[in-house]
Amino acid sequence: MTPAEIRQEIIDILTDIAPDEDLSNLEDDKPFREQIDLDSMDFLDIVMELRKRHRIQIPEEDYGELASMASTVKYLEPKMANL
């Protein structure tokens, strides 16, 4: 997947998790939690959706890599390169 496709996939997952949030102005370098109302369970839902949809395992020690859109895409790019 390309970075743009990964970004869209994350937006799709966020839309499912937080359907009432406006994601149209999401800033790539700003942490998700500063932009949308996500709690720790919502964050785990993101990880679980990535596992379910793409069989990507994200170790707990790497969760910090998923703080913003830019860091999430950067982290997932090598893991999703062949999808």
Image (cartoon, grey):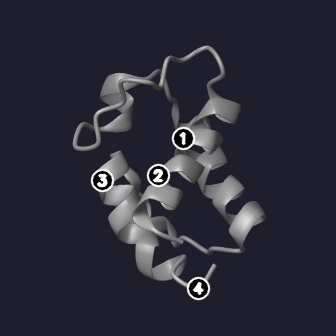
Q: Nearer the viewer, mark 3 or mark 4?
A: 4
Of label 1 and label 4, which has the lower sequence position? Answer: 1
Question: Looking at the image, which residue is at 33% across and 46% down?
Answer: 68
- Which label sits on residue 7? 2
Tag 3: amino acid: Ala
Which residue, given by chain and number where applicable, does mark 3 sit on? Answer: 70
Which residue, given by chain and number where applicable, does mark 1 sit on? Answer: 11
Residue found farthest to the left:
29
Q: CA distance from mark 1 to mark 3?
A: 12 Å
Q: Quadrant of the C terminus?
A: bottom right
Of label 1 and label 3, which has the lower sequence position? Answer: 1
Locate residue 53 relative to residue 62 in the image: left or right: right
Decide: few, some or many residues near mark 2? Use Cα within 10 Å; few <14, some 14-19, many ≥20: many
Of label 3 and label 4, which has the lower sequence position? Answer: 3
Tag 4: amino acid: Asn
Q: Position of residue 43 (x, y in %)?
A: 54, 43
Q: Is residue 55 above or below residue 27?
A: below
Q: CA distance from mark 1 to mark 2?
A: 6 Å
Q: CA distance from mark 4 to mark 2?
A: 16 Å
Which residue, given by chain and number where applicable, does mark 4 sit on? Answer: 82
SS under mark 4: loop
Q: CA distance from mark 3 to mark 4?
A: 20 Å
